[in-house]
Image (spheres, rainbow, N blue to C red):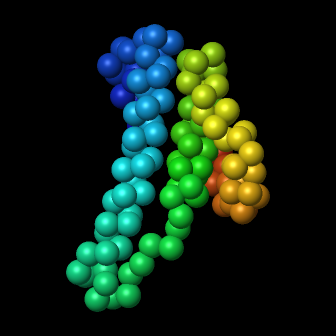
């Protein structure tokens, strides 16, 4: 969806890499905050809801998801936006998270292929 927005707005990606990257980071952090908040609301508590996922895991999964989807359009993003995403995924702190979610990443990749994404 983000690719469609960027394409529709006609934004020059190479000139706005920092802005787009920061927007991606904010979107992922917001998604985590919403998950935590929803797990603490009245209805969720009444039904035993909880949020056991850690913030670094959500940040890594979100970053990986954006990287995976935007890399499918690599001609538009390869020289700019994919580099900071790939760098973040390559940091030493990401290694354990990558190993933990290896199966999930493999499964999601096969789903993306079957959906034609």
| Residue closer to the observer: 111 or 93 | 93
Residue 102 falls in which quadrant of the image? bottom right
The structure residue drawn at horizontal position 53% and vertical position 50%, both measured from the top left corner, is 59
User: Which quadrant of the figure contains the N terminus?
Assistant: top left
Residue at 38% across / 66% down in the picture? 36
Q: Residue at left 38%, top 87%?
A: 48
Residue 3 visible in the displayed image: no
Image coordinates of residue 80 in percent, x first then y, are: 58, 18
Figure quadrant of the C terminus? top right
Where is residue 10, by image quadrant? Answer: top left
- Which residue of the protein is positioned furthest toward the left in this rendering? 42
Q: Is residue 24 above or below residue 98?
A: above
Q: Position of residue 20 (x, y in %)?
A: 43, 26
Closer to the camera in the image, 93 or 31: 93
36 with respect to 77 (left or right): left
Residue 2: x percent and y percent? 42, 34
| Residue drawn at x 58%, y 58% as measured from the top left | 57
Q: Position of residue 37 (x, y in %)?
A: 31, 66
């Amino acid at each position: 969806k983000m690719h469609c927005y960027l394409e529709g707005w006609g934004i020059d990606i190479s000139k706005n890499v920092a802005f787009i990257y920061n927007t991606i980071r904010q979107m992922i952090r917001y998604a985590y905050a919403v998950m935590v908040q929803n797990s603490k609301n009245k209805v969720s508590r009444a039904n035993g809801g909880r949020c056991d996922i850690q913030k670094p895991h959500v940040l890594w999964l979100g970053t990986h998801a954006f990287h995976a989807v935007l890399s499918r359009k690599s001609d538009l993003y390869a020289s700019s936006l994919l580099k900071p995403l790939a760098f973040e995924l390559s940091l030493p702190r990401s290694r354990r998270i990558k190993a933990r979610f290896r199966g999930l990443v493999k499964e999601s990749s096969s789903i993306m292929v079957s959906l034609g994404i």
